[in-house]
Amino acid sequence: MSTNRHLIEKDLIEFQFELASDERAKEIAAHLKNCSKCTEELEKLKRKFAVLDLLKGEVKVSEQLVSK
């Protein structure tokens, strides 16, 4: 993989959630060591998923709404 091309969001998500193959994960990790833009994008994704994780426990439906 060329280190001068930026990673796409799919690559970053697969890397973050350990869905990439071992070989691909090594390539992505090597790219991230040398690319501040992609590292920043990965951090943004981490924050986005952290917020979603917090929100999943927040949704509560009232009994009134359920009974309608």
Image (cartoon, rainbow, N blue to C red):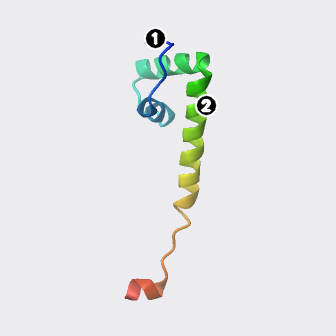
- The residue labelled by disc 2 is 40
Q: Give the CA distance from mark 2 to mark 1.
A: 18 Å
Task: Determine the image quadrant of residue 44.
Answer: top right
Q: Is residue 65 above or below residue 31?
A: below
**What percent of the width, then of the height, locates residue 26?**
49, 18
Whether label 2 touches label 1, CB < 8 Å: no
Q: Residue placed farthest to the left in the image? A: 68
Identified at 41% across, 33% down, the residue is 10
- Amino acid carrying label 2: it is Glu
> How many numbered marks are there?
2
Q: Identify the mark nearer the N-term, 2 or 1.
A: 1
Q: Is residue 2 above or below residue 8?
A: above
> Relative to residue 45, is residue 23 drawn left or right?
left
Disc 1 is placed on an element classified as loop
Secondary structure under the numbered disc 2 in the rendered image? helix
User: Would you name the residue on which mark 1 appears?
Assistant: 2
